Amino acid sequence: MTAGITRRAALGLFGGSALGASLAACGGGSGGSSGSSGSGGGHTTLTMANYDTTQQAAVTDKVTAAFKQQTGISVTLDSLPGSGAAIYPGKLRTEMLGGKAPDVFRCWGGSIAQPFITSRQVISLDPVYTQYGWDAKLSAPNVKDMTFNGVKYGLPLWASAVGVWYRADDYSKAGVSVPTTFAEVETVNAALVKAGIQPWLAGGKYGWYVMRFFEWFLEMTAGPDEHDKLRNSETSWNTSSVVDAFGILQKWAKNKWLPDGVMGLDPTQVEANFTGGKGAMALDGQWIEQNIVAATMAPSSYGTFIPPTDQSQLRFSGFTEGLFVTAESGKAADDEKLLNFFTSVSSQELDQNAYTTVTAAPPISGYAGTAQWTKWLAQHDHYVIQDQSLSTSLANAYFNIQSNVVQGTQTPAAAAAAMQQAAGASKSGT
Amino acid sequence: MVADTAETAPRAAPARQPFPGRSRLARNGSLAGWTFAAPALIIYIAFLVYPALTSLSISFTSWNGISPTRTFVGLQNYAHLIHDSVLQTAARNNLIWALVTIIVPMALGLALAVAVNTRIYLRSLIRTVLYMPAVLPLVGVGTIWGWLYQPAGVINDLLGDIGLRSLSHAWLGDSTTAIWAITVPAVWVRTGFPMLLYLAALQGIPVEYYEAARTDGASAWQRFRHITFPSLRATHYIVLALSLIDTAKVFDLVYAMTNGGPGNSTQVMGTWMYFNVFQSYSFGYGTAIAVVITLVAVVVGIPYVRSQARQLV
């Protein structure tokens, strides 16, 4: 035998090595946790999970590089671009369950962040707000969105609002101007149809785009107080205001003010269809302006306004995104330093965050509509977008009811009754 | 002759060896078998049996998928299955799916196999083109067909071009047509596989059968009915069994094309399980649905597995 090794001995050696490697792997789990090198070498690395696009990640990298320069703490970015609320929270859950939670993560507020809080996967930031004086730096309504049961768990850094974005050329063709009342909105719809222009672009495939219309209508028919109570399931959904809101939704679908077959359309096509001139209006967030600017539409060729609700208190739908610190991190002081760095003016200058909640942020240039919305967000209160304010089970039930109403297979009265039934079931956990 | 004696004489029974100190397992010679099977068995247990048992245990709990504690609820999740109206819709859709996407691809696959089994021009190219949809990723197929089905999409345009504008429709936006619309790309994708199996089986039918039938004056239909179809019995069985197992796993096309909508009208068991687990955070209930799907697939697959095992013996 070559080198005097028998086949049996060679197999035994291989088996022993494999066993050894397996045992080593089992015992070596703590070595690579969260990309941290620990404090032994005097250098700390934090991991930050978010859903940045490649462009956004490049900006975040700039901010974290500046943070490293100032503090010596490195930040490793773990992005899941374009995943949205349907996928990203699942990734976070998997990492947390697997003991590989990031130190810091970006997330939406409301019912999306709620499970992480009830499961004690994130820490309270109440003392940190006091330590760094964040209340004075940040917009109060957004801080409210990151507050759960009176405890501040997240640092709100991004605020979005849902408003009407319109094409000036279509308005001009139809001979209409920006509406200031809800009745005027419907007049504009009718005029656009008469001019052969599709009034609204929308996509109902996932439910949430058409939901924006319903919550606007409900804000108008119920008013802010009742709307808030409805969203918190503190009052019955089987009321005339809900019936009226569903009635308007059904009318808009029937009149083809919403696109034909809207429930089968993909909402991701709305922005491209808007810039492509396939419809006059979109009910969208400030992010649509990035596409508008990218499509080289002249600033005078489009505009935006707050959806009229005819209520004395004008509110609109919005949502807040923020940063959270995980309970598993074990580096809370460094995590909090990083969070605070994001609120600094120098960071804001690097970030050029168009959705900032930081009151001392530099002005936004090149995005007139977004800049306008930043002002409106500071001036007006907002209600949290419905799919983040309703419980997940109630939101899912709503999507089904909404679909029936839009298709005309359920009357508005039956829809309101069904919503109440779903709210009751959601409350009792059945 | 010695050799003759050795061949004709009855063999003496081998003397029993006492094997002192060795276990019955070792004596039976199965220790070596277990040793050789061990690596695969360990992987199987670690990555299939253990997760399956864990899933089963989760199905008896109420859990949001992240909380450190799970609340044991016994059979509550399974009891809820009976009252879940969406699950009933999903089960009905699974049945529609199974009927359409098994029968139609089998029939089309057989017809195409018979057609391309003849000496036709560019036969190999035609076979490749017909099989090609089967290798495409289903999410891509779903996305492309989603565009085709748009109200202003190619399908409605084609209907308009041939004078059938009145039939144009929001195919995926209407609860009554959406599930049927999704089965069309499913049929398109799934026809290639039975075609391939039938084509292989057709090669094995002796030509003499057909020659004899022709001599007896049998028509093409009679030859198909009395020779081709019965000769493909084993292939019918394999195609049917594999297709049945496949239909229990339906997910991709529905998820990509309608996301279970409009409303919940196109939910199937797989998508409804996914929504419960990953969107509603009802891990216990979603896992109970997964257990039911698995049981259905197992029950459906048993005859196939048994037939395969029989062939191995």
Image (tube, coloured by chain):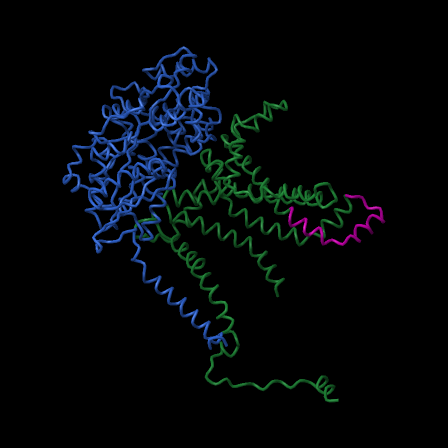
Task: Pinpoint residue B122: horizontal percent, then vertical percent.
Answer: 70, 41
As drawn, is B55 to the left or to the right of B241?
left
| Of the pair A202 and A227, the residue shown nearer to us | A202
As drawn, is B49 to the left or to the right of B97?
left
| Of the pair B101 and A288, the residue shown nearer to us | A288
Q: Residue at x 59, y 60 (%)?
A: B306
As drawn, is B162 to the left or to the right of B24?
right
Task: Pinpoint residue A63: horizontal percent, then vertical percent.
Answer: 26, 38
In blue, which chain? A
Task: Pinpoint residue A389: horizontal percent, then vertical percent.
Answer: 30, 34
Hey, which quadrant is residue A185 in on the image?
A: top left
Q: Main secondary structure of the magenta part?
A: helix
Q: Residue furthest top?
A: A175
Q: Quadrant of the C terminus of chain A?
A: top left
Hey, which quadrant is residue A18 in on the image?
A: bottom left
A300 over A405 or under it: above or below = above
Q: Residue furthest front?
A: A3
A285 drawn magenta: no
Q: Colour of chain B?
A: green
Task: Pinpoint residue B109: horizontal percent, then vertical percent.
Answer: 65, 44
B197 over A197 or under it: above or below = below
Q: Residue furthest bottom?
A: B1
Q: Which residues are magenta?
A: B195-220
| Of the pair B283 and B165, the residue shown nearer to us | B165
Q: Residue at x 46, y 27 (%)?
A: A262
